[in-house]
Amino acid sequence: MGTLTEHRKRGSPARARADALARLSEEHRRRQAVALAQLDCLQGVRLEHLAKLAELSVLRPFVPGAVIQGEGVANSQLFLILRGTVTLTLHDRLGRNTLIGVLNRGDCFGEGPLFGDRFRGATVQAETICYLLQTPLESVVELMSNAPELTAALRATYLRRLVESTLARVPLFSRLSPLERVGVAALLQPAHYRRGETIIREGEPGEALYLVESGQVIVEQNGQAIAHLEEGDFFGEMSLLTDQPHNADVRALTPVEVLTVPANQFHQLLDSQPQLAAQLREVAERRRTHGALVRRDATRVHEYAEAVQHGLLRGSHVLVRDAQLCKPDCDLCVAACTTRHGHARLSIHDATFHGFDITDTCRQCRVGAECVEVCPADAIQWKANGALAISDACTGCGECVMTCPYDAVQLVPRNRTARSPLELLWQRVKRTARPTIPLEPAMPTERADKCDLCYGFDDLACVAACPSGALRLTPVEELFSF
């Protein structure tokens, strides 16, 4: 009995120390959360979620001049500025380097891939000694699933940054100072257009200047596509400058978010910015010349039509094969894909542009992906490698298979034996013809599958297996001169 009592006495200090450490740890978590709550970019986020965010993060110092993030480089981290100053710059559509803005304590950057395209973004450079809290985006995504306030806070930063970068990318506004662009931003009115909706019609009077904030549009004259515009582009200026009706239709290729400057405010802006007015007239003249050239060039008209039909403009990159470097009947890339995934996710022969074969595979649509829109389980999401991937949350309903306009998704059994979209349609017809009432919920035996750029692997199986270097992932801008 005495031995047990002595053991308890000896154990009490150990338990007390453990309890004290636990209290210190909890107090440390609370203080971290309170400190993060003071940051402007995290206003309104619950302390419990901020404490978790702190746990997932590491503190990183940067010296003046250090490039923290590069423009056009795939980014996988969210950064919170605890101390110091950084600058954001990017190149406009004419290749000129433009200052977007200066960020200080309380700001964040790197949030773009959470809501948009992973391959875009700005160059972020430390101007002073900086202390940043760095968090993997995949960890942030998991936290956001149960933290709506965090999602709202980061989305607000993303949308504000998107407006700033949109204005900076447009050559028309890139030469303005950040402060002058803030003034322009105050004039902008947001508008949304559905996929396929006509935004402006040929023959109608101009009512506004339109800046594409997100999404893609096609410019058409007499039913022929003559231009493709996307984030950072603008349209509608010709009618406003000439006081003549629009000379083309502009149609939404995807769901489109635009920022408009109404006609009266547009003219006031040009009166206050003569240099801006001159630049705009130069752009309008170049577009008239371009449109005339395209209409006379049957090859380019055909290329536009083919690019739209095959969805080649929907993503930022396209998997292409240089036919001159590829040996005849070589299918090593397809075999490698089959070996890794249990079935082929790509086919080589789809369309040909400028000597390159475009593979028949997922386009990784960066805006308005039909598969994402119809998925009832939210199982198709952006991943760290810049691709849309299908998670285990997939129920095998097959809606994405039937909805994808490019036949890029297939339904496969859980054991990864592929089934074609045609077979899937036949099975759905049979189920409709002979409905049954299950006695208990059935576990899904199939799941959707598509190319996700080999998410989870260190390489692309198809590209790695190519012995001649003929297969590569190419930016859309390099493939097309549109």
Image (cartoon, rainbow, N blue to C red):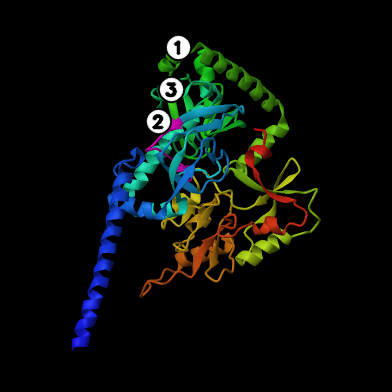
Look at the image and tell me whether residue 199 can be seen. no
Magenta segment range?
102-113
Q: Are marks 2 and 1 in contact (CB under 8 Å)?
A: no
Q: Nearer the viewer, residue 151 or 421?
A: 151
**Which residue type does callout 1 highlight?**
Ser
- Characterize the local packing of mark 3: few (<14), some (14-19) or many (20 or more) Cα atoms within 10 angstroms: few
In the image, taking residue 29 as reference, residue 428 lies left or right, namely right
For label 2, the residue is 190
Q: Quadrant of the N terminus?
A: bottom left
Which residue, given by chain and number where applicable, does mark 3 sit on?
A: 179
Residue 204 belongs to magenta span: no
Circles 1 and 3 in contact, beta carbons < 8 Å: no
Q: Nearer the viewer, mark 2 or mark 1?
A: 1
What's under tag 3, amino acid-wise?
A: Leu
Amino acid type for the residue under numbered disc 2: Pro
Quarter of the image with the C terminus is: top right
* Percent position of residue 412, x then y: 55, 66
| Label 2 Cα crowd, 10 Å radius (few <14 / some 14-19 / many 20+) | some
Q: Dot 3 lies on which element?
A: helix
User: Separation of disc 3 and disc 2 at Cα?
Assistant: 20 Å
Q: Up-down: is 426 above or below 5?
A: above
Q: Position of residue 81 (x, y in %)?
A: 41, 40
Task: Compare residues 267 and 111 and report the one nearer the observer.
Answer: 111
Q: Residue 104 magenta-drawn?
A: yes
Of 473 and 109, the residue lying toward us: 109
Measured from the top left, where is residue 415 in percent x and y? Answer: 55, 71
Residue that label 1 marks? 272
Give the CA separation, mark 2 to mark 1.
23 Å
Where 254 sits versus 436, above or below?
A: above
Upstream in sequence: badge 2 or badge 1 = 2
